[in-house]
Amino acid sequence: MVAGGRRGWLWKRRSDLRYGTAPAGGRAPGSACGPVELGDAVRKEFLGRGWKFPFQFDTATGGVAMSEYEQNIKENISVILGTKPGERQKLYEFGCAIHELMFAPATRVTATMIAGKIKSSLARWEPRIEVTTVDAWPDQAGTIKVHVEYKIRTTLSEEELFLLLSTGG
């Protein structure tokens, strides 16, 4: 496609919105739109929409239930952490390898390995967030507690997630 064509403009416009800058003159090349103003609604649009997880139907419309924005990110994180690598067709590396440690003893070493696997898989598969900390520790009941803190890149809001993982020990 030629420079300044529609495809180039869409890419340029997305990058302008993502990084919070407007093109010179306030307009994208070849576009008829006005200056780009970045409000909360525009920033949230980049967080996305998708099918609700777990899958369900919307009782009001009869269609597929959708999630959006921060809720969509939380649901995608649960999909990433709940998927074993090799389980998804055509994307064999997708997921988190914490399932390999399911029968490992609930020790500090196992907790550290789980934290590392969670941090690396979220960094790889969820580009909308920046993982700030992942803490994991064993408790007396033989489970491993995990605390994940992350920042949403476009809105800079901070979120957290708690997991309780049962292991073999």
Image (spheres, rainbow, N blue to C red):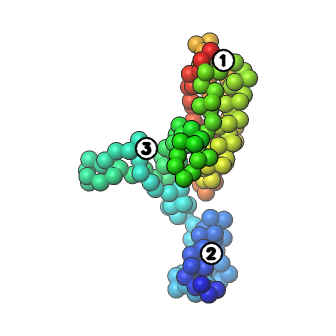
First in sequence: mark 2 vs mark 3: 2
Residue picked out by circle 2: 12
Mark 2 or mark 3: which is in front? 3
Above or below 11: residue 135: above
Mark 3 neighbour density, 10 Å: few (under 14) some (14–19) many (20 or more):
some
Q: Within 10 angstroms of label 1, few (less than 14), some, or many (20 or more) residues?
A: some
Instruction: Check disc 2 and report its element: helix, strand or loop.
Output: helix
- Compared to 46, does 139 lie above or below? above
Report the front residue among 46 and 126: 126
Q: Residues within 10 Å of mark 2 (few under 14, many from 20)?
A: some
Q: Quadrant of residue 37?
A: bottom right
Provide the residue designation for mark 1: 105
Which residue lies under the disc numbered 3?
A: 53
Of the 4 image quadrants, the one containing the C terminus is top right
Where residue 136 sits, quadrant-wise, is top right
Query: Which quarter of the picture shows residue 131?
Result: top right
**Amino acid on which the number 1 mark rests in the picture:** Pro
Q: Amino acid at mark 2?
A: Lys
Residue 145, horizontal then vertical, whole percent: 61, 24
Q: CA distance from mark 2 to mark 3?
A: 32 Å
